[in-house]
Image (cartoon, grey):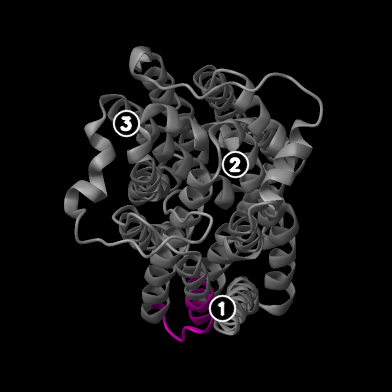
Amino acid sequence: MTAAIAEHGRKSVSRGSTRSGGLRATFGALAVPNYRIYVSGQAVANTGTWIQNIALDWLVLQLTGSPAAVGIAMALQFTPILFLGMHGGMLADRYSKRTILMTTQVLSGLLAGSLAVMTLTGRISVGFVYAVALIGGVVFAIDNPTRQVFVSEVVPARYLRNAVALNAAVFQSTRLVGPAVASILIGTVGSGWAFGVNALCYLGPTVALAFLRTADLTPTPRSLRAPGQLRSALRYVADRPHVAWTIALVGVFGTFGLNFPVVLTAMASQTFAGGAGLYGTFNIVLAVGSIAGALIAGSRTRIRLRLIVAMGAAFGLAQFAAALAPTLAVFVVALVAMGVTNLAFQAMANSSVQLSVDPEFRGRVMGLYMLVFIGGTPLGAPLVGYVTEHAGVRAGMALCGLVPMVAALALGLMLSVRVSRAARTAQLAA
């Protein structure tokens, strides 16, 4: 899951140019040795994550035969962030981000290992999967906000936008490998071995974090324990409308737009009469578009809020088109468009927020960001699963596209009205 790049200041700074960047603009953060070490570890971990995601979705569908059950499992993974998201960000503001991340990687590896053991021994049940999903969600609520802001300690500020975009590109690149490996493992030796591979993959980021050159890190000032730190972060966001509106749109996007495990498993098995292999293929196709979207975002230097809004609306339109696709070929083309617009939106929104806030608030603000982005899943996933199961797969996927598209268009209209009013006021004043 994951994210990254684009900047606009308080007044939505001017459009970025891609002319001066070229390849240096797209891959500039790789010039930092620590970042190369860090992103290599993330690549290994992300590959394992994709392997487990595919295996877990398919295992739940096999155990229950219900797309709604897949939605429940997905919701349980993200419910804790509703309650702990900002607390996770507060921990990142208070303590060593590197130490927190090393701890969460070890815990995640142990959880994946427990899934592997229970599945391979034939004792796996939906209840156990749900329990692991919930515990993993608690770990994720601490890990994710910390990981979002840790990159600002790994690279100099001038590379932050690019590093966030490259993180997203790497995450999506591993989506090309992970689903393919998962499909092979599920089809040959079963889901249990897929979980085991993921457990081993957590060694990658753990070792990488241990080998970072601490002298080259630039730790942000730590916040001291004090009452009202979460409320102060909320007031801080409320005082910055461009940050608040971006986070609000991200919340709608995450709640309704990204229920891929629910709709794509059902599209693969019901609409196109395929199996785990076709579901894996859908994820690979999404990844191809997503890599392009992340690199497009990373090559830009400055982004206006209206471009973020446009990408959100375009993603909703692409998903709505996918829901109506009459053939598998048309559906695949729509998936590519979904991938491009999805990651462009995520990368621009993520870095825009990070670069618009002061370092001492960044952990809590990104905790709020991830809370609304991922924390809406416990609400959206069961709803989409219910619609998919009772009104049909295409209806469920159409809902996932329409809601973000309408929200983005409404925000775009509101911003246009405000700009027009400001222009008229300026003319009258002149």
| Residue at 63% from the left image edge and 61% from the top image edge | 245
Q: Which residue is found at the position 41% from the left and 75% from the top?
A: 334
Three-letter residue code for mark 1:
Ala
Query: Badge 3 is on which residue?
Result: 40
The residue that label 1 is drawn on is 426
Between 412 and 406, the one nearer to me in the picture:
412
Q: Which of these two is toward me, 95 or 260?
A: 95
Which one is earlier in the sequence, the residue at label 1 or at label 2? 2
Compare residues 4 and 376 and report the one nearer the observer. 4
Residue at (39, 33) in percent of width and height: 42
In this rendering, position of residue 325 left or right of residue 226: left
Q: Residues within 10 Å of mark 2 (few under 14, many from 20)?
A: many
Per the image, the residue denoted by label 2 is 366
Q: Look at the magenta stretch and give its main secondary structure.
A: helix
In the displayed structure, 54 sits above or below 382; it is above
Query: What secondary structure is marked by label 2?
Result: helix
The tag earlier along the polypeptide, 1 or 3, is 3
* Disc number lying in front (2 or 3): 2
For image coordinates 69% across by 64% down, the residue present is 385
- Which is in the foreground here, disc 1 or disc 2? 1
Picture quadrant of residue 370: top right
Task: Report the side of 190 relative to 340 (left or right).
Answer: right
Q: CA distance from mark 1 to mark 3?
A: 51 Å
